[in-house]
């Protein structure tokens, strides 16, 4: 691997009096740029969290491409840049790994892969802000900070009338029919589990993307929230799930499988969390994916280093209770970080098991191309570390063609009840639907 060029960036650390207020101003100020990646943990207590929030803005170089040889292109780009790069991987990069295609309808038209080297970086942890600007723009640090501090959010943020009429890509009747056919495949032993999703969409939609993000984030307070503005394409995400993180030689994956709604009554709500923890169907779904992730991690792991650190633990979020497992491994120092991600991609929690058979079923029975949904958003560091989420509970918007979309899904196993699976989808869609209301 290349040596890190530390002269690339100029760094500065400052102590903030009001980090919460500064975060709001920082994201608002960033909207002047055509390339914005904002990652926010919402102060959720996570074991493997490095930062409370990260902002990457301003394009210095970038890579965007479709799936043939996309991972090789990303590997070359990352190694040549040897700097921070931020972006996303779409679910359809599966076609770069297996002999698969994506022929379904795509209303969004996002590139299959997009990464950029930002001119300006902000890392926030507790009340410490670390700024890292490319040396070419280091003289902007003080003037940018002054501008951010003087923003009056009460005057700056203007309410914008959203025009969004949500439609279902498939009817409930179609969904139940497809699910029953999938269950036949499961009963025949073709697959054990498949994540089946459906899209909700709006044509001729107009929204204020930042306002929608702020609304969605206030509803969900998710630990892997993100806001991406890449020219005319926007991703507004309230993801609760980490896909994979590399910290030194340690790799961590934290799949989610198992969902229960929240209730306003505390005792009843707590009981739902207990019921989820003891639900054999939900636990079996989770354990199947844990086995899949263990197998995927072993492809790049030092022999005997794959460990299940946490199995089927229930975490509580503002909208739902979720069952999460944590699996880790250790890799050799010489293993390229892009190869690690490729060996795990797409994440098992969004495919099913066996992975290839599940992806074939998904392609056959889903009606739309997943694109960024069930892909990953995150970044690589110059030290070859990375952190990526799973893109769920997210809204996608192509401002040019005014197409807006969000998708939801669930794990289907032999014990699945189609009616209950449909209801679970609607529970997962509540936050996105609310965020789009004025």
Image: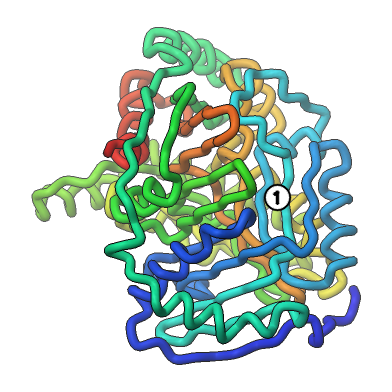
Q: Is residue 380 above or below residue 232?
A: below
**Residue 394 in view of the camera:** yes
x, y percent for residue 241: 48, 53
Name the one closer to the observer, 359 or 119: 119
**Residue 329 in view of the camera:** no
Q: Is residue 429 above or below residue 177?
A: below
Position of 97 compared to 381: left or right?
A: right
Mark 1 closeness class: few <14, some 14–19, many ≥20 residues within 10 Å: many
- Quadrant position of residue 437: top left
Q: Quadrant of the C terminus?
A: top left
Residue under the point 30% across and 56% down = 316
x, y percent for residue 413: 48, 28
Q: Is residue 416 above or below residue 58?
A: above
Looking at the rendered structure, the secondary structure element under dot 1 is: helix
Position of 103 compared to 437: left or right?
A: right
Name the one closer to the observer, 168 or 154: 154
Q: Is residue 112 above or below residue 29?
A: above
x, y percent for residue 235: 53, 45
Total number of numbered discs in the rendering: 1
Name the one closer to the observer, 208 or 313: 208
Q: Which residue is mark 1?
A: 344
Residue under the point 90% across and 73% down = 1
x, y percent for residue 336: 83, 64
Residue under the point 46% across and 56% down = 225
Position of 378 compared to 93: left or right?
A: left
Residue under the point 61% across and 40% down = 372
Asked which colour scheme the image uses, the reply is rainbow
């Amino acid at each position: 691997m290349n040596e890190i060029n530390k002269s690339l960036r100029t760094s500065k650390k400052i102590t903030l009096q009001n980090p919460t207020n500064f975060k709001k101003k920082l994201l608002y100020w960033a909207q002047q740029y055509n390339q914005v990646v904002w990652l926010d943990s919402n102060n959720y207590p996570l074991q493997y969290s490095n930062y409370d929030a990260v902002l990457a803005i301003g394009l210095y170089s970038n890579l965007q491409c479709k799936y043939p040889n996309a991972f090789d292109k990303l590997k070359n780009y990352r190694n040549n840049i040897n700097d921070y790069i931020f972006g996303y991987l779409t679910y359809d990069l599966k076609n770069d790994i297996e002999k698969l295609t994506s022929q379904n309808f795509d209303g969004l038209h996002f590139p299959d892969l997009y990464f950029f080297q930002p001119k300006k970086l902000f890392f926030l942890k507790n009340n410490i802000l670390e700024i890292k600007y490319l040396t070419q723009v280091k003289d902007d640090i003080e003037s940018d900070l002054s501008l951010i501090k003087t923003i009056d959010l009460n005057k700056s943020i203007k309410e914008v009338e959203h025009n969004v009429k949500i439609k279902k890509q498939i009817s409930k009747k179609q969904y139940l029919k497809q699910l029953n056919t999938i269950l036949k495949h499961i009963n025949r032993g073709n697959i054990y589990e498949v994540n089946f999703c459906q899209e909700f969409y709006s044509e001729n939609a107009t929204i204020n993307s930042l306002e929608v993000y702020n609304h969605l984030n206030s509803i969900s307070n998710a630990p892997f929230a993100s806001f991406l503005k890449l020219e005319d394409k926007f991703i507004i995400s309230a993801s609760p799930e980490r896909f994979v993180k590399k910290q030194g030689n340690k790799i961590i994956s934290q799949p989610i499988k198992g969902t229960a709604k929240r209730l306003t009554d505390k005792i009843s709500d707590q009981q739902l969390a207990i019921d989820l923890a003891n639900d054999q169907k939900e636990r079996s779904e989770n354990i199947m994916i844990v086995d899949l992730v263990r197998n995927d991690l072993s492809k790049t792991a030092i022999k005997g280093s794959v460990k299940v650190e946490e199995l089927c633990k229930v975490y509580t979020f503002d909208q739902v209770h979720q069952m999460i497992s944590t699996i880790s491994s250790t890799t050799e120092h010489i293993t390229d970080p892009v190869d690690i991600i490729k060996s795990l991609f797409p994440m098992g929690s969004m495919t099913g098991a066996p992975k290839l058979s599940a992806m074939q079923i998904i392609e056959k029975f889903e009606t739309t191309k997943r694109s960024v949904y069930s892909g990953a958003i995150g970044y690589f560091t110059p030290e070859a570390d990375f952190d990526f989420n799973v893109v769920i509970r997210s809204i996608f918007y192509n401002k040019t063609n005014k197409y807006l979309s969000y998708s939801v899904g669930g794990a289907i196993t032999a014990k699945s009840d189609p009616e209950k699976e449909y209801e679970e989808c609607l529970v997962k869609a509540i936050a996105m639907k609310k965020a789009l209301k004025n």
